[in-house]
């Protein structure tokens, strides 16, 4: 049995807390929101973000960050990406040397273009950082539906420890040393999912979505490889796997926000309607800046930025993508 501190009580944090509890671990869940902790403690259910998923009576909920961090074998950082740095700063004084922090949020910091693991390492240099990502809606993990995911670390021993910690008969965990690739796949698929949702909102069909998914993963892989990630990662769970599920499911807050934008809502209106952090909005600008830095073309992500931040119409963005210069998909020798 391990002692786990879950830092963040949103839908993903609660779903993983229940998984880890059922795996025989002692779980303490922290939130900065008093009303959220009171609801979880009293109702044993996150009625806003994960309704219907009941939590055990001996799962501990706290507003005290020190209580959630100190003495824990593993910390799982499950706050939304825009709050990762500030939360890590608050955690730092309680984290011991070598304590494992597993980041499960998906995003790239807009101001610095740093991945979230880089942000955490900068703020808590004494910790050992890992990432957990893949096609995994909290709504399904919370209900115990079969899910497969990947954990990334620099040390094999840590990866295998976390694999054993999280793995169950409904939650299969693979391991990988490609932390950068895992994070980029998990973050940038949210931007492409916005595009897929926009296409849905415009009334386009399966052909359009298939094209966005296929060319979207090509963009993500192109940037990832230029930054030093492994191409194979983008063919796996946190690449094409996560992209498919996020572009296709109504559980996806990014797709839902995209649908609203496609129907004419502004970015702000769409985010307010979804009532959850739409990670792709925050990662879009960072992805554009990374593309410029590494001199990589990301036409879908570029158009999403123009729709979100430059008042470009969604229909015009799709038209521009369709009318781009002719390209070769696969290079090679012709007869």
Image (spheres, rainbow, N blue to C red):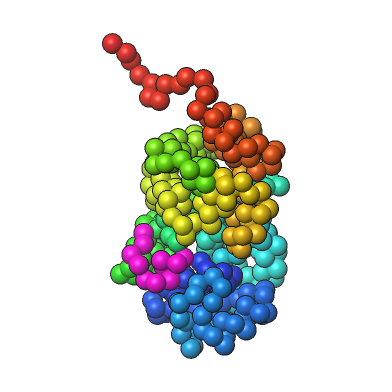
Q: Residue at image x 45%, y 61%?
A: 137
Task: Name the residue rendered at 30%, 69% in the picture.
Answer: 169
On screen, residue 204 above or below 143: above
Give the magenta-colored segment's residue range: 138-148
Horizontal and vertical percent position of residue 53: 45, 77
Q: Nearer the viewer, residue 123 or 317?
A: 317
Residue 56 against residue 104 in the figure, above or below: below
Residue 202, visible in the rendered structure: yes
Residue extending farthest left:
335
Instruction: Look at the image and tell me in which quarter the N terminus lies.
Output: bottom left
User: Which of the 4 quarters of the picture holds residue 278?
Assistant: bottom right
Q: Is residue 2 left or right of residue 70?
A: left
Q: Residue at x 49, y 75 (%)?
A: 51
Q: How many marks?
A: 0
The image shows residue 126, relative to residue 52, as above or below, that is above
Report the side of 236 relative to 130 (left or right).
left
- Quadrant assignment, res 329: top left
Instruction: Indicate the quadrant where residue 122 lies.
Output: bottom right
In the rendered image, residue 32, in percent from the top left (x then y), is placed at 67, 73
């Amino acid at each position: 049995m391990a002692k786990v501190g879950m830092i963040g009580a949103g839908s993903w944090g609660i779903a993983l807390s229940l998984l880890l509890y059922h795996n025989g671990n002692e779980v303490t869940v922290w939130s900065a929101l008093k009303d959220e902790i009171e609801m979880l403690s009293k109702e044993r259910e996150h009625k806003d973000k994960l309704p219907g998923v009941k939590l055990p009576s001996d799962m501990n909920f706290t507003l005290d960050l020190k209580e959630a961090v100190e003495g824990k074998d593993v910390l799982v950082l499950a706050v939304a990406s825009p709050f990762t740095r500030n939360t890590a700063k608050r955690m730092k004084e309680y984290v011991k040397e070598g304590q494992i922090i597993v980041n499960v949020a998906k995003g790239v910091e807009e101001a610095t273009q740093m991945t979230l693991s880089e942000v955490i390492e900068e703020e808590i240099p004494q910790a050992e950082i890992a990432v957990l990502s893949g096609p995994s809606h909290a709504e399904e993990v919370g209900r115990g539906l079969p899910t497969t995911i990947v954990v990334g670390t620099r040390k094999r021993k840590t990866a295998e420890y976390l694999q054993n910690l999280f793995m169950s008969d409904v939650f299969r965990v693979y391991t990988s040393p490609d932390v950068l690739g895992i994070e980029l796949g998990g973050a940038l698929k949210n931007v492409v999912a916005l595009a897929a949702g926009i296409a849905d909102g415009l009334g386009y069909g399966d052909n359009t979505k298939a094209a966005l998914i296929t060319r979207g993963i090509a963009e993500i892989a192109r940037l990832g490889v230029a930054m030093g990630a492994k191409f194979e990662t983008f063919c796996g769970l946190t690449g094409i796997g996560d992209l498919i599920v996020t572009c296709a499911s109504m559980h996806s807050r990014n797709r839902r926000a995209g649908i609203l934008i496609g129907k004419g809502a502004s970015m702000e209106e769409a985010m307010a309607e979804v009532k959850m952090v739409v990670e792709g909005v925050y990662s879009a600008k960072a992805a554009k800046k990374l593309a410029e830095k590494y001199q990589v073309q990301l036409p879908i992500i570029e158009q999403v930025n123009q729709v979100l931040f430059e008042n470009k119409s969604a229909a015009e963005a799709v038209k521009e993508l369709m009318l781009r210069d002719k390209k070769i998909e696969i290079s090679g020798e012709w007869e």
